[in-house]
Image: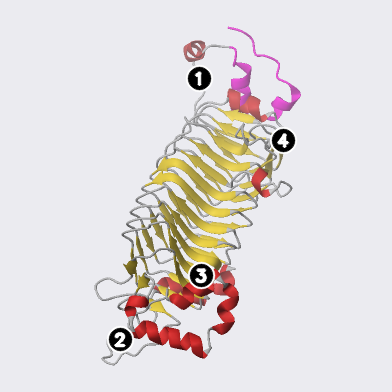
């Protein structure tokens, strides 16, 4: 049997179990088994400033590497099932080389917990990232980490059933917006979930492309272009997220069979909810509070849009590009400068089963007391279209001439230019516990 190798001084402070493995590394597995020294999975204490890649290479599948507070050299490769865990205060720091991937996971069942991961490369074509989950990294768990100053925080590139949760992900603040990576990028990763993360200072908070069966839930997004950005991602869920002050809160593009519920978008620069070629999806119980456009529908078809609160926007709903077959009921449109901008000449009904939507600017009577206005709501008359084309005409809205035109439209519907009709407008906003919780906790949410 070969004698023990003399270990470098840095390795002598490791646990006896790992020292034994490092010493016997040149032996084959068969020789270890024959000698009765084959090591079992163990918890290994790793002091600060240890060459972490050497420890990983010597470890056995299933080992737990407990990192002490301090700094470790990054750009490590994890190619076997291991757990890397730091102290609860996240003061074990994996410092990258500002080139490439700080942590590159190439095996399934890897867990990374309570570690600070910093300083990845900054090359978008090379897919640099703080933590890169490669295609074999099925069932990875990335939990309770600080992932700071990287290009992409976590890149989920093809593994199944990865879970990224309870992390703080902050991008590189020195890069221009279009040079930044995303907080989390998901590509072709069925069953993966992104939950309870705080994501800021990236391009998009979560960008999902060509994937399915994903859940993005209970995340908080600030200082981003889009909070959630879907491209070709089907049969997935976006729920209970909060977007504050981003350009677009939830951009759902070229995807189908989505469930989008109980999300909040506050003070979006452009759009709260954007449905671009989103098909056969359910958009329910969301809140958009402040935006240029609350909801933008572009070639979005056969969706159910109900129970949403859209308020304090310049345009409540911008509806265009031949969107068809959408059921839009039980929503509340409150204090929007323009409730609906409809680009088209057809008439579209926004009520179903004698239930429409609540419109804060609709003056109507309810003589029989059934909660439904006695007159239909039509937000797209000649005057509204004039204001869209010439916003300065708004100063004339209270003039006698405008009043005459509005009266004429009610008496002679044939002169209406087409547009949205809500034949059963609600006299008051529907009771919705999601809206009530938002009103009660508005200050703390922001």
Q: Residue at x 33, y 54 (%)?
A: 280
Q: Secondary structure at mark 3?
A: strand
- Work out whether residue 176 or residue 13 is closer to the camera in this orientation and state it: 176
Q: Which residue is mark 3?
A: 315
Q: Which residue is mark 2?
A: 374
Instruction: Give the Cα distance between marks 4 and 2.
Output: 66 Å
Mark nearer the N terminus (4 vs 1): 1
- Work out whether residue 103 or residue 412 is closer to the camera in this orientation and state it: 412
Q: Which of labels 1 and 3 is toward the front? A: 3
- Would you say 50 lies left or right of 163 here? right
Please tell me in which quadrant of the rendered image residue 376 appears. bottom left
Q: Which of labels 2 and 1 is toward the front? A: 2
**Local crowd at mark 2 within 10 Å, few (<14), some, or many (≥20)?**
some
Disc number at residue 98?
4
Disc number at residue 38?
1
- Which span of residues is magenta-colored? 1-26
Tags 4 and 2 touching, CB below 8 Å: no
């Amino acid at each position: 049997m070969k004698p023990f190798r003399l270990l470098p001084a840095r390795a002598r402070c490791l646990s006896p179990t790992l020292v034994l493995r490092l010493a016997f590394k040149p032996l084959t597995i068969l020789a270890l088994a024959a000698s009765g020294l084959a090591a079992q999975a163990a918890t290994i204490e790793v002091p600060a400033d240890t060459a972490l890649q050497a420890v990983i290479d010597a470890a056995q599948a299933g080992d737990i590497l407990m990192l002490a507070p301090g700094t470790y050299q990054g750009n490590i490769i994890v190619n076997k099932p291991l757990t890397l865990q730091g102290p609860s205060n996240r003061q074990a720091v994996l410092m990258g080389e500002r080139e490439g991937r700080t942590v590159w996971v190439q095996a399934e069942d890897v867990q990374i917990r309570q570690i600070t991961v910093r300083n990845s490369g900054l090359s978008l074509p090379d897919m640099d990232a703080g933590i890169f989950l490669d295609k074999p990294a099925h069932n990875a768990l990335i939990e309770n980490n600080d992932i700071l100053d990287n290009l992409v925080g976590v890149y989920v590139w093809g593994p199944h059933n990865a879970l990224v949760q309870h992390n703080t992900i902050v991008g590189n603040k020195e890069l221009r917006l279009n040079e930044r990576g995303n907080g989390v990028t998901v590509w072709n990763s069925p069953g993966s979930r992104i939950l309870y993360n705080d994501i800021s200072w990236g391009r998009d908070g979560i960008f999902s492309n060509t994937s399915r069966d994903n859940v993005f839930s209970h995340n908080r997004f600030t200082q981003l272009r889009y909070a959630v950005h879907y491209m070709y991602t089907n049969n997935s869920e976006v729920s209970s997220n909060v977007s504050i002050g981003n350009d677009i809160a939830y951009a759902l593009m070229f995807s189908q069979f989505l469930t989008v519920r109980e999300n909040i978008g506050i003070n979006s620069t452009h759009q709260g909810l954007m449905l671009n070629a989103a098909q056969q999806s359910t958009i329910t119980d969301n809140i958009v509070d402040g935006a240029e456009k609350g909801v933008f529908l572009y070639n979005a078809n056969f969706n159910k849009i109900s129970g949403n609160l859209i308020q304090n926007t310049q345009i409540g709903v911008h509806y265009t590009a031949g969107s068809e077959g959408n059921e839009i009921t039980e929503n509340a449109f409150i204090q929007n400068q323009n409730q609906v901008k409809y680009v088209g000449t057809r008439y579209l009904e926004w009520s179903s089963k004698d239930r429409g939507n609540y419109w804060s600017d609709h003056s109507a009577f309810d003589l029989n007391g059934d909660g439904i206005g006695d007159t239909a709501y039509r937000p797209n008359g000649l005057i509204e279209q004039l204001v869209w084309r010439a916003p300065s005409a708004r100063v004339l809205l209270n003039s006698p001439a405008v009043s005459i035109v509005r009266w004429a439209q009610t008496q002679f519907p044939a002169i209406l230019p087409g547009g949205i009709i809500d034949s059963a407008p609600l006299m008051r906003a529907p009771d919705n516990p999601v809206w009530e919780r938002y009103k009660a906790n508005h200050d703390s949410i922001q």
